[in-house]
Amino acid sequence: MLVRLLAADSLGTRSMCTFVDTGDVSVVIDPGAALGPWRYGLKPHPKEVKRLEEHKAEIASLTSKADLVIVTHYHYDHIPRPYEDVSWLKGKMVIIKDPENNINFSQRSRARLFLEQLRKVGCKVSIADGGDIRIGTTSIKFSKAVQHGNSPKLGYVVEVCISTSGECLVHTSDVEGLVEDQQLSFIIDNKPDTIICDGPMTYMLGSRFTENDLEKSISNLMKVVASCRPAVLVLDHHLIRDISWRDRINKLMVYAESFGTRVCTAATLSGLSYEPLEAMRRKLYESFPVDEGWNVKANEYEDV
């Protein structure tokens, strides 16, 4: 099974876009990317905007060649925005998070706009939640809707399991470090050897993410490691926005190593340079000052 992260926070944009090729079927999960509109009181740096353009181009290119597209929820770091050209999705089979049930108002509204985009390019759409499909020797299963992080305010997501020929991958979508027990069972039941997981949202520690949330997240991730013994646990997305993320989860990393599990970022898994540009934004502005005329509209990059 070939697994490649097309965009991720450790690669410079907000995303968990993943390409998987099992030999039977090629799949793109969550074909979107975005930037944090504000960080340290600063708008996105030109280098971030350029990286976003590169990632979106890569996503469009590979998705246009993929057999299947999966959408786990409707935040704009996971799907294209309404004004974007989505001709690269033309005629695709797209399996989506249920746009009407277990969904908050914001995501329901965005889902309707996205469905209209898909309709215009002739996509074949079906619902993911709790379902499964088989293509050749490849099985693709979807969790029931689970909470987006530690609060239902941001809605719900579906987790994805792809397995073939003794290999098994789980993509958790935005679980913010498995901070809720409901997010655990799908992973443990499927016993993946590779897990692509949204890490705990420690850059919001003390506000939207508490010390108790972090403790619960680490505890649940340790349960996953002990139960599944995956070869690789990728932690990325929300976690990588914290420049000190390694210190936050050191206990987990030591524990995982004792089980032979490698904890790494999407950049490491993909063999690419680790460049968490959002976390580095202050340094980017210091090292690469922008022209006075730089006036990027931060709200254009809002993801949730």
Image (spheres, rainbow, N blue to C red):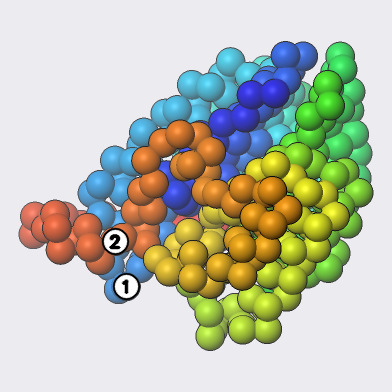
- Left-right relation of 23 to 34: right
Of helix, strand and loop, which one carries label 2? helix
Q: Residue 195 falls in which quadrant of the image?
A: top right
- Left-right relation of 237 to 197: left
Tell me the residue that label 1 is attached to. 40
In the image, is residue 80 above or below residue 76?
above
- Left-right relation of 291 to 193: left
From the viewer's side, name the closer residue of 40 and 83. Answer: 40
Of helix, strand and loop, which one carries label 1? loop
Residue occupying the point 31% across, 49% down:
48
Q: Residue 280 falls in which quadrant of the image?
A: bottom left
Residue occupying the point 76% across, 40% down:
193
Q: Are marks 2 and 1 in contact (CB under 8 Å)?
A: yes
* Residue at the extreme front: 258
Tell me the residue that label 2 is attached to. 281
Q: Amino acid at mark 2?
A: Arg
Q: Residue 184 falls in which quadrant of the image?
A: bottom right
Q: Amino acid at mark 1?
A: Tyr
Q: From the image, which quarter does the C terminus lie in?
A: bottom right
Q: Residue 96: image x %, image y %?
A: 75, 39
Q: Residue 263: image x %, image y %?
A: 60, 51
